[in-house]
Image: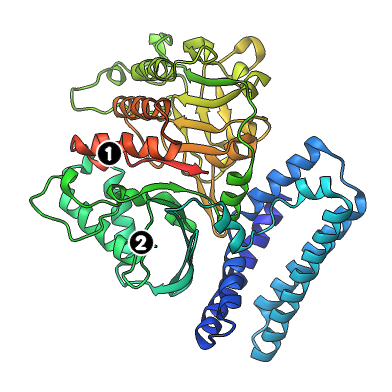
Amino acid sequence: MFTDKVALTKTTLKTNTQIVNICYRLANQTNEDSLIFVNKALFFSEKSKSRILLDQIAEKNVIVKLKMPEWIYEAERNYRFTIAKLHMKLNEEVEYSKRISIYADLFDIYRAHETLIDSIKTNYPKFAELMYDTKIPEVAEVQNTLPAGTSIRSYMLGDDEIYIFDISQNTFRFDTVNFRPDFAQNFADFKALISDAEKQDYKHALLEKSYGLYRQLFPAHIPLPADTKRLIIIPDDSLALIPFEALLTEQPRPNAKLKDQELLINKYTISYAPSVSMFYKLITEKQSSATKDVIAFAPVFDYLTDASKLNPDSLILSPNDLLYRSLSSNPDYNKPLPNTKKEVRNIIRAVGKTSSAAYMQTAANESFVKSDQLADYKIIHFATHANTNSENPELSRIELAADTLHGEDGFLHAAEIYGLTWDADLVTLSACETGTGKIISGEGVMGLSRAIFYAGSRNVIATLWQVDDTKSSELMTSFYKYYANGQSFPDALRYAKLDMLRNNEHPFTWAGYVLVGQ
């Protein structure tokens, strides 16, 4: 079923991109109805973002809480089947007049589907509340949830251009920018330079690529609303793999230190969401009803001492070496992460709540994490090793202590996380590459962070590359201190990053941690 949905997503993505392009051109040809076409463009852009995830969450809610009448499922299946057939027919049809007719049929079937949803809302309100919280919100609904000074920028990558939607409390704008000839190279170089510790000396090259990307993604003819202080980025496709806060907003100054360069993080508090619809769902949800505050896990791995399985050289670190929080190629051994112990202790001290708890070494085991007890906590923090499987994202995993007594090997896979039920305001994955995974066009990143949303969290902090044990501990300690002093999750993470930037730390050390969610 999931594979079929992915295949359908890929099929409909092309169609939806074409429809967005048509809406853009129609909006620019008429003044009277331009807003109608702009709204339609956003609607079909949202049809191409994280729909499977939203559907999965809704279906899980229905399964967990209520039994759905069979006729509703049958009607849903029929509409989805008809829509899928029309999309496939559209991709096969080359004659212009027939394509226009199919577009009209698509609009009609979507409208009929909305009528069905309205009927179910009237007659079966409880079912509708759970099943149809994936409905794409109207622009006005989104605007009503946004505080003053908050803006959403949503991207959709076309064949030759980038479609950009800006939404704030009082403005809604839709525009395009053509791909620059150097966009692909700038993107690849920026991603490679910022995520590689061995390339930290290539500061000028990084800044040049960073500025090139900024000009493409924040073109001068599409300025953000002037009052923007908080910026929510809705990336598309591989854009989800770069930290926008590290983009340079003006020409690099060759002799200036990194802390004196004009990075985007200096202007805005930045967070991310898979789609406008997902952001709206998360921000309109009730906060966690959990009764306890923070639970933090750090297996540390300093108790693994079977020297017969080790390469002696793997235990030696030179003063300039970095200790990554990624799984070792040796299945029987992972380097200890001494700073994870310090990290979770500092977090519990910073939060200062009696209902918080830290589990370290063998206590941070897979059996406990899979227990129902985590549903009692508002914040769940993991400081450990992780591994992303880009070919089979369900096999991506974080490492915990094994529990052989209960048959648990210590590897908590994404597929297992999907089976858990949490009620968290935040889950932090302080380990390597926890925000990466397999990119599926129209659906986004498939990996650990996606599984966390499904399990039940309104926000996820994850990482875009291999992160260092020492610097991660510093950043996370600072983040929780700011949070404990009353800052929101996005602001707390920004201030923690700015502290490191003001110490002239390379973006490698701080930009890899990103907040996705509310």
Q: Amino acid at mark 2?
A: Ala
Element marked by disc 1: helix
Residue at 35% x, 40% y: name it. Answer: 494
Q: Which residue is mark 1?
A: 498
Q: Which numbered disc, 1 or 2, marks the residue that appears first in the sequence?
A: 2
CA–CA distance in space, label 1 to label 2: 22 Å
> Is 271 on the left or on the right of 275, as rendered?
left
Residue at 49% x, 25% y: name it. Answer: 381
Residue at 39% x, 11% y: name it. Answer: 302
Of tags 1 and 2, which is closer to the observer? Answer: 2
Report x, y in % for residue 504: 18, 38
Q: Nearer the viewer, residue 303 or 98?
A: 98
Element marked by disc 2: loop
Do tag 1 and tag 2 residues touch (Cβ < 8 Å)?
Answer: no
Q: Is residue 404 above or below residue 42?
A: above
Q: Is residue 213 above or below residue 498?
A: below
> In which quadrant of the rendered view does residue 285 lie?
top right
How dense is the environment of label 2, judged by Cα within 10 Å: few (below 14), some, or many (20 and up)? few
- Marker disc for residue 226: 2
> In which quadrant of the rendered view does residue 467 lie?
top left
- Is residue 77 visible in the rendered image? The answer is no
Report x, y in % for residue 184: 35, 64
Q: Amino acid at mark 1?
A: Leu
